[in-house]
Amino acid sequence: MSRELLRHLPGVDKWLASEQGSVLCAEYSRAEVVEVMRMHLARIRSHLENGGGDLPPLASDEYTQLLRAELLERREISLKPVINATGIIIHTNLGRAPLAEEAIEAMARVSAGYSNLEYDLKSGSRGSRNQHAEHMLCALTGAEAALVVNNCAAAVLLSLRVLAGDGEVVVSRGELIEIGGSFRMPDVIAASGARMIEVGTTNRTTIQDYAGALSEQTRVLLTSHPSNYRIVGFTASADPKELAALAKDNGLVLIQDLGSGTLVAVTELDSEPTAADCIADGADVVMFSGDKMLGGPQAGIILGRAELIESLKRHPMARALRIDKLSLAALTATLRLYMPPHDPRERVPVLRMIAESEASVGRRAARIVKQLADVKGLTASVADAVSYAGGGTLPMAELPTRVVRLEVAGLSAAALAARLRSMQPPVIARISKDTVNLDLRTVQGNQTRDLVGAIRQAMP
C-alpha cells in the first residue's frame, strides 16, 4: 500500500505547476515555495516508507493554507524583543545590556538620515568617527587618547598585533581566561602573531615571575582581569603599579584587559578596578567592553598613552574592526550620562537594575501576584531569591531579590516555561525547584502589562 501511495506523490515541478503551487508562487518567491514543498514531500515520503497509510490532500485549499502558514513563519523576523525575567542583568544570550532611552533616541536620529560620522563641520573636510567618543572617554578616565572598535575581543587582537607584533607577550597562568563562546586568551594571542610566555602558577604570580621572564624579544606585559571567576585562598598577584614600573624600566608596554570593565564603582560588593584606576596606576593601554557594566552598545574601548593609541588608529586592521555609526551614536549618548552632573546610576539601565533594592523589587512582584489572583489553576506567590550581574561580571556578588513563583496544576515547570517562551513577546523565566520564577529586577517597567498578559495566555 505504501509503495502505491509513493507512486502518487507528485514531483516538485509538477506540484508547482498546479493551481495551488501557482497561487503560492504568486505570493512568495518560487525558491521559497520550492524549499518548503521539498521538505513536505520528503516528510510525507518518510512517513509512508515507515508504514504510514495515508496521503495528505496536497491539492486541497487546507493543505495550501498549511504551506502558506509555514512560508509566512519563515519570513517572520527572527530577532525580536523578549522579556528577561531571569534576574540576570547582563544576559549574554539575551543581548547583554539594555540601552538607556537617550542611547535609543541617538540611534534613531542618526539612522533616519545622513550624519557627520566622518565629516568635520568646522573645516568642511574629512573627519574621524573616533572623535565623537574620544574626548569624553579621556575626560572620564584621565587617559591621553582613546579608540573604539567593534568589541573587546577586537580591542585585544588589535592591541597585541600592533604593540607586540611577532614578539613575546608575558602573561600570568592565572589569567589565561576563557569567556563565553570559547573565546580563549591564548588563542587570541596566537591569532595576533605574538608569542605567549606564561609565568607564575594558577593561583600565585609575583612581580619577580614577570621580571624573570623578560628577554630581548619581550614586547608586552599583559594582564587580564578575571571578571567571570575568582581564585580564592592561597593566592598572590603582582601589584599594578609595580607592573607599570617594570614595563617602563624595560621599555615595554603594559596592557590591561578589564573584560567587562567599568567607569564607576557599582555596588559595595564591587571590587572591580575602574578604567580610571588602571590609568592612574600607570597602565599604558586599558581596554573593556561597552555592552556590559558600562551599559552601552557592543563596543571595545581602548584607552592609553597618545602615541600608542595613535599607532592603533593607523593600523589597517583598525578599519576592519571599527565601530559602526549606530553603535557609536548609542555609545556617545551613554557616555554623556556619565559626565557631571549626571549620575549614571539613575539613567543607565544596567546600573539602575543592580542598584535597585530588594524591597523595591518585592513591591513590584507583589503587584504582579495581585493581578494574577483571578487566574484559575494558577498559584502565584512572592519568594526570596538572588539576582546576578551576569555577562562575566561581579562573579562573587549575589543581589538579594524577590521573585514571582508560578505553579500550574498538571503542568510541569519546564512545560510552563516553554509556553511563556512561545508568547508574543516571549518571556524568559528561571526554573528553580520545579517552579517557574520571574525576577522583576530585569523586567522593564513598560513590560509589566505584557508580562501579565503572557502569563494569562500561557495557561492551559
Image (cartoon, rainbow, N blue to C red):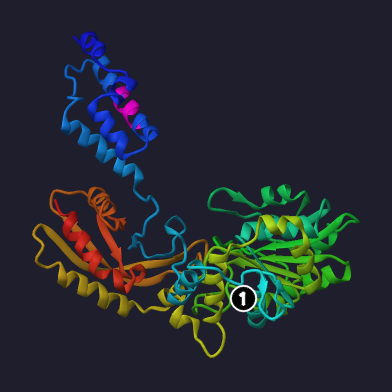
Circle 1 Cα neighbour tier, 10 Å, few/some/many (<14 / 14–19 / ≥20) = some
Residue 341 magenta? no
Q: Residue at x 57, y 48 (%)?
A: 182
Residue 38 magenta? yes
Whether residue 319 sits left or right of residue 38 in the image: it is right
> Front-most of 199 and 374?
374
Identify whether 37 is placed above or below 157: above
The amino acid on which the numbered mark 1 sits, given as a three-letter code, is Thr
| Quadrant position of residue 118 | bottom right
Q: Residue at x 22, y 60 (%)?
A: 454
Whether residue 353 sits left or right of residue 139 in the image: it is left
Q: Is residue 432 visible?
A: yes
- What quarter of the picture does the N terminus occupy? top left
Image coords of residue 15 (percent x, y): 28, 23
Q: Secondary structure at mark 1?
A: loop
Q: Is residue 201 visible?
A: no
Q: Residue at x 17, y 56 (%)?
A: 457
> Front-most of 275 and 62?
62
Residue annotated with mark 1: 274
Q: Which residues lie in the magenta part?
A: 36-42
Whether residue 252 sits left or right of residue 178 in the image: it is right
> Front-most of 60 and 191?
60
| Quadrant position of residue 142 | bottom right
Identify whether 278 is placed above or below 7: below
Image coords of residue 287 (percent x, y): 66, 67
> Front-most of 201 and 185?
185
Image coords of residue 356 (percent x, y): 38, 78
Q: Main secondary structure of the magenta part?
A: helix
Which residue of the protein is positioned furthest toward the right in this rendering?
216
